[in-house]
Image (cartoon, helix red, strand yellow):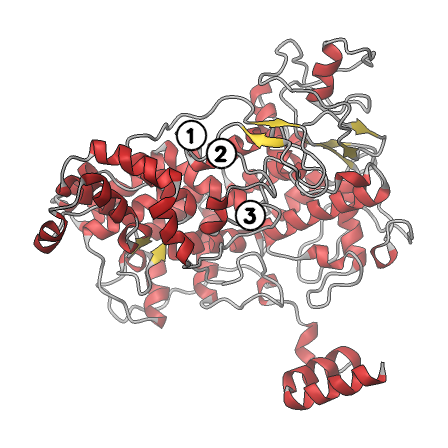
Amino acid sequence: MAANLQLLFRRMVRQPSILLLFSVGLLGITDSSANEPPWSFQRLQRPALPKATDPTWPKQELDLFYLAKNKPLPDASRATLIRRVAFDLTGLPPTWTEVEAFVNDRASDDDALAKVVDAYLKSPRFGERWARHWLDVVRYADSVGRTWNAPFTYAWKYRDWVIDSFNSDKPYNRFVAEQIAGDLIPAKTVEERRDQIIGTGMLALGAMDLSEGSDERFIMDQVDDQIDVTSRAFMGLTIACARCHDHKTDPVSMKDYYALAGVFYSSRTLPGQAAKWNLTGAGYVDPEMLVDLPAKLDEELTSPSKLPSGIHSMGDVQDYSRGNGRTAPPYDVDPFFAMGVLEDKARNCEICNAGDPYDRGAAPRRAGMEIPSLPKLSDVKAGESGRKQYADWMTQPTHPLTSRVMANRIWAHLFGQGIVRTVDDFGVTGASPSDPALLDHLAVQFVTGGWSVKKLIRSIVLSRTYRQQLAQARRIDFESIRDAMLFIADRLDTSRPEGIQVSGIGGKGNTGRVRALIGMESPWRTIYLPVLRDLLPDDYSTWDFPPPTQIKGQRDVTTVPPQSLWFMNSDFSSSVSTDAANKLKSIEAAYQAILGRDPSAEERSETSDFDTETLVQALFATAEFRYLF
């Protein structure tokens, strides 16, 4: 111990930053600002508009904020701009017909761009593009991962729900609320209720250790996952850091954590698998009980109500209906609810001392979080989990975090980096906003615009700020690369694959006993390909697809040799290039379809001896195809 301390002090002499941390952490020396709430907790209010130094430049109010701090770059050409807009809004390149129509449109730049943007916002491809962004945030996957990689047989219902929500421009506050408490929100029709319930599937997507069974450790791990995803995805807060001790930097105590834990402790999580359940609502997969689940649920079971403790998932319902030697208990079940969360026995959650689920302390009042500077949750009545109150609290217009976090996420997807660079962390350890006034302007605009994601995106894309030439090129992501190649080769099927898209029962050590039924060579958009934890194809890691166990609002972007080799040698690239070459019969057609422009005279001369397939594969591999400018 003494030797280790001596080594530490020697290092501190060489690295003063370590000395500072040692002083603060061990000697109790604190900065007076440490007790102040983070900037993001401050009241959301509309900032004053800056005066324009050049009144002719701004197109939107946000341009005034940009102009106050930056020297504008020249506008991008129309050909460059439509390609950027098409990929940003749909994840696909514009057709050559669309490029020509925009470039040759005699309307003003404002009117011509508005027509293009409105068309892309109305396209079903918009929801597929922006849903993928959201699925990164909520750690979407089609299998559990970890010790027993069982399939999430019905996760695709939640995935499609997200796509439909973005396409219909479901108000974001409603979008958030349905994922936390869709089963508790009043609905006008049975169809609406079913849709809301599917939204709660987000809470059941965690990577859980199924070997823990249904013991208290499993329950608390599941609760922790639900706290983490809801607090980070919607508010940019790492509340889960207070599971074992008071949060080290943010004003969140263990008491706050376990007050929120009581909300999910009083909820029943259904993973959409055949499972054994105890009365606490925690579930684990029993391989002996797993059956091949049908693609369509039993249409005869239509009564929407709470699942009793004897029925655990639609897998069980189907198993019982087949007469597999077990007697079905009485039940009344909504067959469309296969994966998600319901109310369970309401109870407060005792504090786990040092995070130990078997060493319990006093139980704080359920939903009784008292985080400084944030609003208080409404009181929870006896018999209620508090999920509805949690959703209402988070989505109130005056909440300082929810609108800021989503406005920042939208900005990050359109510009490559958020106004707050740490898009999932708005706490003390996160980055400060590069332009706090601009962020608040966007957040207020978002709320007053009815929480419309499409309205906010439209405003940003029509701004002069967005229209500039990019100071730094942005690489398109893996899904856009694959989908664009299929689209150009005329192989893309824009329909949805029907029914269940995974099979198997999983296996210990992720042995591959769960598999995807559609893969890289299938014609569907990449968002529809199953995401199996620990079993993703190598193509995904090559292009920086985020690990589906993580909440990842901002993807890493690397440039590595395997990416170039992928275009040259992968089976997918070779087959798509062959099909594209059969469609594109000339040098001009290849350049127009792949790069969105005509070839130069020099390029025509240099590629005149290329066979079409070689030319196509070479153009796919260019930086001009992979990047937006």
Residue under the point 52% across and 52% down? 553
**Image quadrant in which you'd find residue 505:** top right
Give how far apart the Cα atoms at labels 2 and 3 are. 17 Å
- Give the quadrant of residue 280: top right
Q: Distance between the residues labelled 1 and 3?
A: 25 Å
Dot 3: within a 10 Å radius of its alpha carbon, few (fewer than 14), some, or many (20 or more) residues? many
- Compare marks 1 and 3 and give the one earlier in the sequence: 3
As helix, strand or loop, the secondary structure at mark 1 comes to loop
Q: Which amino acid does label 1 sit on?
A: Ser
Please report contact status of discs 1 and 2: CB closer than 8 Å, yes or no: yes
Taking the image as shown, residue 167 lies to the left or right of residue 399, namely left
User: Which numbered tag is attached to residue 529?
Assistant: 2
* Above/below status of 446 relative to 310: below
- Mark 2 neighbour density, 10 Å: few (under 14) some (14–19) many (20 or more): many
| Local SS, label 2 | loop
- Name above or below for residue 126 compared with residue 290: below
Q: Can residue 90 be seen in this view?
A: no
The spot of residue 145 in percent (x, y) is: 66, 41
Q: Which amino acid does label 2 sit on?
A: Leu
Q: Are marks 2 and 3 in contact (CB under 8 Å)?
A: no
The quadrant the C terminus occupies is: bottom left
Residue 604 spot, x, y in % from top left: 10, 49
First in sequence, mark 2 or 3: give its number: 3
Residue occupied by mark 1: 522
In the image, 39: left or right of 581? right
Residue at the spot of label 3: 137
Mark 1 to mark 2: distance in Å? 8 Å
Look at the numbered disc 3 and give the secondary structure of its residue.
helix
- Foreground tag (2 vs 3): 2
Q: Measured from the top left, where is residue 144 in percent x and y?
A: 66, 38
